[in-house]
Image (tube, grey):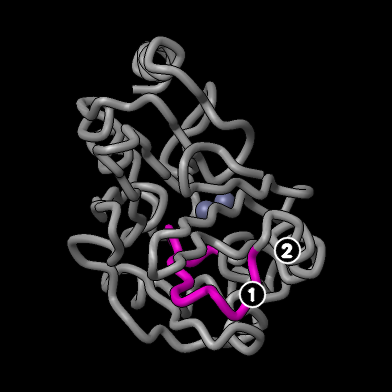
Amino acid sequence: MKLVKNVYWYPEKAIGDCNTYLIDNNPCVLIDPGNPRYLSQRLSEMENDGFDIREIDLIANTHSHPDHCGANRALQTLSGAKIAMHREELEHLSFSMEFAGYFGMEMPKFDVDIFLEDKLGGKMKFVVIHTPGHTPGSVSFYCEELKLLMCGDLLFEGGVGRTDFPGGDLEKLKDSIRRVSELDIHYLLPGHGGVVKGAEKTKRNFEFIKEYFL
Ligand SMILES: [Zn+2]
Ligand SMILES: [Zn+2]
């Protein structure tokens, strides 16, 4: 579903899946394709919004966990899109693969084609912010024009990302949350749960998180 301007939201379907976002920005960027089990459902939702899967140019992952990257390879095969994540997450990827097997989650092997550095390409500027803590190479995407932050598993509506998995670091997570809380945000788009809309609600969410989790 359309969230704002050229940003679309495909909500997580179940535990073991995640929120998928699509930025129709020439290039067309898909953030976190989620669990492969729900890929066909997700693709038909996109088709209903008028997208052809072959229009997707880039699959950008907020981090390498299987609930976010499980469908990377299938989506790449169908769309021909390149796969991107942060350089520091690449070292963590083999762990995420093991982790997927341990929890019985599907994550077919894929190659990372591009490292996420300072920004995503396109007419509307989306800055890449390295926000470690949940994993070493977790990233968030911020669009100043839309005042919109996609934060992966850094924080959620009323909560923060887990740091008890290998590669997690609570102090880094806290530091990353403090940094993004300085941004002007009217749309907070996390990797799980609901989207937080409105400057006031977003501010209150950060206040709640600072009070209970930082
Ligand atoms: Zn995660
Ligand atoms: Zn997740």
Query: Crowdedness of circle 2 by 10 Å Cα count: few (<14), some, many (20+)?
Result: few
Reading the image, the residue beneath label 2 is: 47
Query: From which residue to which does the magenta span run?
Result: 51-65
Above or below residue 168? Residue 176 is above
Apparent side of residue 82 relative to residue 99 in the rendered image (left or right): left
Does the segment drawn in magenta span residue 54? Answer: yes
Is disc 1 in contact with disc 2, using a CB cutoff of under 8 Å?
Answer: yes
Residue 98, given in percent of the width and then of the height, sits at 58, 76
- Comparing 196 with 210, the one in front is 196
Query: Crowdedness of circle 1 by 10 Å Cα count: few (<14), some, many (20+)?
Result: some
Apparent side of residue 11 relative to residue 69 in the rendered image (left or right): right
- Amino acid carrying mark 2 in the image: Glu
- Amino acid carrying mark 1 in the image: Ile
Above or below residue 176? Residue 106 is below
Does the segment drawn in magenta span residue 196? Answer: no
Among all residues in the image, which is located at the extreme front?
A: 50
Reading the image, the residue beneath label 1 is: 53
- Comparing 107 with 9, the one in front is 9
| Separation of marks 1 and 2 at Cα, in angstroms | 8 Å
- Comparing 167 with 18, the one in front is 18
